[in-house]
Amino acid sequence: RDRVAAREADHRQRNQALADMRKNTKALVDDDLLDDLVDVDGDGVADMSAAEVRAQKAREGRDRVAAREADHRQRNQALADMRKNTKALVDDDLLDDLVDVDGDGVADMSAAEVRAQKAREGRDRVAAR
């Protein structure tokens, strides 16, 4: 009987100790991972909380997106200016293109000037007959 009573008393004491431990425990599980400190620069010392790291990365991401959008706007404006200032979309006037007449590899006159010169030479030959 004494052993049974001693065992019951020991159980009651242990149960009371466990109950006190449960009652005095702040959190059973640390579910908030964002309050944990994180080593950012790799020196082994915690620099900021995970929430601060997430906020910093989000800020950097927004900055990159804003820079990309500004670059797109600037490029679109440059293209619009080019389109606006272009004189002709297609060069249909072939007579204003320069032509190499004497075969030296250097453009001498425009195609219209070549045609006019040949026409003059033709009229001179006819007049000389």
Image: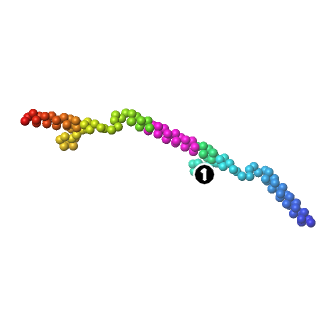
Q: Position of residue 33 (x, y in %)?
A: 66, 49
Q: Secondary structure at mark 1?
A: loop
Name the image quarter holding residue 12. bottom right
| Residue found at x 79% / y 53% | 21
Region rendered in magenta: 57-75
Q: Is residue 33 left or right of residue 8?
A: left
**Image colouring:** rainbow
Q: Is residue 32 above or below residue 91?
A: below
Task: Indicate yes or no whether the magenta region holds residue 61.
Answer: yes
Q: Position of residue 95 (x, y in %)?
A: 25, 37
Name the image quarter holding residue 98. top left
User: The residue under label 1 is which amino acid type?
Assistant: Gly
Q: Quadrant of the C terminus?
A: top left
Q: Is residue 47 above or below residue 1?
A: above
Q: Which residue is mark 1?
A: 44
Name the image quarter holding residue 114. top left
| Residue found at x 81% / y 54% | 19
Which of 42/50 is in front? 50
Which of 110/55 is in front? 110
| Residue found at x 58% / y 43% | 58
Which of 90/39 is in front? 90
